[in-house]
């Protein structure tokens, strides 16, 4: 075995497929959001409604279809499914090009749903098949590459989609780009090697809600893997909170313009990728929860950094220049703002350190032939936790709480989650 597996056929094609998929999702999503905001919506309220609707439409398939997708992945040749899903993405993106040219918002939202659906079907496969290609000693690094690169793909797709659609001939270039990326993903899928794992029959449940209940119940049969699912879902609760509120935080609390928002979002994605790289340097041997009880430390660190950054921003007040919202260069010239920026980046790095070992624990604690269904249960609960984040924020806004107070409540909730993590991990270690 060579020293690194990254460029080997058993990993690199799958890595490219998942990176291109995440990249394309975000090129399309952000192009749609910018098109709605600056061209299609007639009023600010209509823009806000359509953007919120778009976010819900994209996440809905992950809740509705992940259970069925997991059953399908565990009962069929995963390599064949990857190729069919990537071919479907090409067809979806061809439809997207037509919808962009027509500037038909209804058709664009339908395309968005199907993009979410193909991602929901691919998710259980990519994490389920990874242990079939990598050894246990390589699995942490493989998950690190997947997690870190996904956030980089989200960042790059968001930047490219938003910039391109509003440029000259933007509709043409976005349409061409999403088709080319989809074609590249399909061609790379043809190079993904076949798995030698024996396929065991799984009864497919066409009742989607029944399948959701069944797969969550099935996941609970493997306590350590299900613990990882819950811990991962909490990460997405935190991530959804910060990513959704970042524009408001930067504009209303820090008094900065959209270029600073973009910098914060970029920093968040890069920070998680950096955290994923850092944890890979530990060369951890992950076989059970006992070896990951230390993950409570980055979780506690996130709360402490959140509380510190909130306190600093609370005492700063809204900092605006004579001309309104401050620019990126003005923002970076302030030592106070630099400290806030470092703290936000540290939250992201700690998140990356926290999340990668949990995906590995999920995989090693789930038996062969059942991993895709476990990943499906993970995707379902991720979606539930992200919706819960939105509901929590909406409820506190309705009570007239300020954003910094809301973020402080999130930090306190995270401390509660850290206590749960510590106690539950200890109990599972004893029961092992």
Image (cartoon, rainbow, N blue to C red):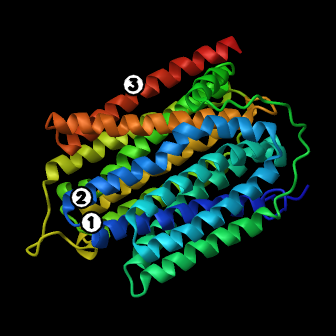
Nearer the observer, 116 or 230: 116
Is any atom of residue 26 visible in this view?
A: yes
Left or right, 242 with reference to 176: left
- Residues at discs 2 and 1 in contact (Cβ within 8 Å): yes
- Total number of numbered discs in the rendering: 3
N-terminal label among 2 and 3: 2
The 10 Å Cα crowd at callout 2, few under 14, some 14 to 19, many 20 or more, is: some
**Spatial separation of the CA atoms under disc 2 and disc 3:** 37 Å
N-terminal label among 3 and 1: 1
Residue positioned most to the top: 431
Residue positioned most to the bottom: 168
Q: Position of residue 186 (x, y in %)?
A: 72, 66
The residue tagged with tag 3: helix, strand or loop? helix
In the rendered image, the quadrant that contains the N terminus is bottom right
Front of the two marks 2 and 3: 2
Mark 2 highlights which residue? 46
The residue tagged with tag 2: helix, strand or loop? helix
Residue positioned most to the left: 322
**Spatial separation of the CA atoms under disc 2 and disc 1:** 6 Å
- Residues at discs 3 and 1 in contact (Cβ within 8 Å): no
Q: Position of residue 47 (x, y in %)?
A: 27, 60
Mark 3 highlights which residue? 416
Is any atom of residue 350 visible in this view?
A: no
């Amino acid at each position: 075995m060579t020293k690194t597996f990254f460029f080997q056929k058993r990993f690199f094609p799958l890595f490219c497929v998942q990176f291109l998929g995440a990249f394309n999702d975000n090129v399309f999503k952000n192009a749609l959001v910018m098109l709605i905001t600056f061209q299609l919506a007639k009023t600010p309220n209509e823009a806000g409604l359509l953007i919120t609707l778009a976010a819900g439409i994209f996440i809905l398939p992950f809740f509705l279809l992940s259970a069925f997708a997991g059953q399908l992945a565990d009962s069929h040749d995963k390599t064949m499914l990857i190729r069919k899903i990537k071919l479907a993405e090409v067809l979806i993106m061809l439809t997207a090009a037509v919808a962009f040219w027509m500037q038909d918002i209804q058709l664009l939202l339908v395309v968005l749903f199907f993009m979410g659906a193909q991602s929901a079907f691919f998710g259980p496969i990519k994490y389920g098949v990874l242990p079939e290609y990598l050894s246990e000693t390589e699995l942490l690094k493989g998950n690190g590459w997947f997690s870190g690169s996904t956030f980089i793909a989200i960042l790059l797709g968001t930047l490219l989609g938003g910039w391109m659609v509003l440029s000259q001939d933007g509709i043409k270039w976005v349409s061409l780009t999403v088709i080319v990326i989809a074609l590249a993903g399909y061609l790379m899928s043809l190079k993904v090697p076949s798995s030698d794992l024996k396929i065991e029959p799984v009864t497919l449940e066409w009742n989607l809600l029944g399948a959701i209940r069944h797969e969550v119940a099935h996941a609970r049969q493997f306590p350590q893997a299900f613990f990882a699912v819950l811990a991962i879902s909490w990460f997405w609760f935190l991530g959804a909170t910060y990513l959704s509120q970042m524009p408001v935080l930067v504009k209303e609390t820090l008094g900065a313009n959209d270029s600073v928002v973009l910098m914060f979002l970029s920093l968040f994605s890069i920070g998680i990728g950096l955290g994923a790289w850092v944890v890979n340097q530990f060369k951890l041997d992950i076989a059970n929860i006992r070896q990951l009880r230390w993950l409570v430390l980055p979780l506690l660190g996130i709360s402490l950094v959140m509380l510190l950054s909130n306190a600093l921003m609370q005492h700063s007040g809204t900092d605006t220049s004579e001309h309104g919202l401050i620019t990126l260069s003005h923002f970076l010239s302030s030592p106070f703002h630099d400290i806030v920026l470092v703290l936000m980046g540290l939250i992201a790095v700690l998140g990356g350190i926290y999340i990668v070992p949990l995906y590995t624990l999920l995989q090693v604690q789930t038996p062969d032939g059942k991993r895709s269904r476990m990943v499906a249960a993970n995707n379902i609960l991720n979606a539930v936790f992200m919706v819960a984040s939105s509901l929590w924020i909406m409820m506190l806004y309705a009570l007239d709480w300020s954003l910094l107070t809301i973020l402080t409540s999130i930090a306190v909730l995270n401390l509660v989650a850290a206590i749960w993590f510590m106690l539950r991990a200890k109990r599972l270690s004893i029961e092992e």
